[in-house]
Image: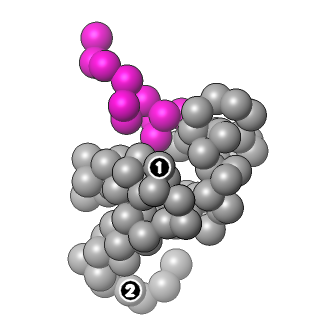
Amino acid sequence: MSDEPREHRLKRLHMRSMRRGIKEMDLILSTYADRHLSTMTDAELDVYDALLNENDQDLYRWVTGQEAPPAHIADLIGAVSRTFQPEK
């Protein structure tokens, strides 16, 4: 973990969520970031940061259920996928 202040880290991760390669992932990840980043633990932010390093085409296929995500980010991909599902 770096010495980056939490506030700066949250802003950086939010910006990276909004500025993706494809518009669909901009919308999906920025919405997820808006709703969840501020309440995530440092360990959860580490996983989210790693997710942001993945290719957008792969992320889109994982989030939409077209392909299974890698095990190390599967739980987070599931949470991101649920961002646009209606609450029960």
Image mark count = 2
Residue 34 x/y as whole percent: 26, 54
The residue identified by callout 2 is 4
Q: Quadrant of residue 26?
A: bottom left
Give the side of residue 70 with respect to residue 1, left or right. Answer: right
Q: Are marks 2 and 1 in contact (CB under 8 Å)?
A: no
For the view shown, which residue lies furthest in the front direction?
A: 23
Q: Quadrant of the C terminus?
A: top left
Q: Residue at x 47, y 49 (%)?
A: 24
Span highlighted in magenta in the image: 78-88
Q: Is residue 79 magenta?
A: yes
Q: Decide if residue 7 is in sight here.
A: yes
Q: Helix, strand, or loop for circle 1?
A: helix
Give the side of residue 71 with respect to residue 63, left or right. Answer: right
Residue 47 x/y as whole percent: 55, 58
Residue 1 x/y as whole percent: 52, 78
The residue identified by callout 1 is 24
In this view, the mark in front (2 or 1) = 1
Q: Residue at x 70, y 50 (%)?
A: 58
Residue sitting nearer the eye, 30 or 40: 30
Q: Helix, strand, or loop for circle 2?
A: loop
For the view shown, which residue lies furthest in the top direction?
A: 88
Residue sitting nearer the eye, 73 or 32: 32
Q: Quadrant of residue 55?
A: bottom right
Q: Characterize the magenta stretch by its predominant secondary structure.
A: helix
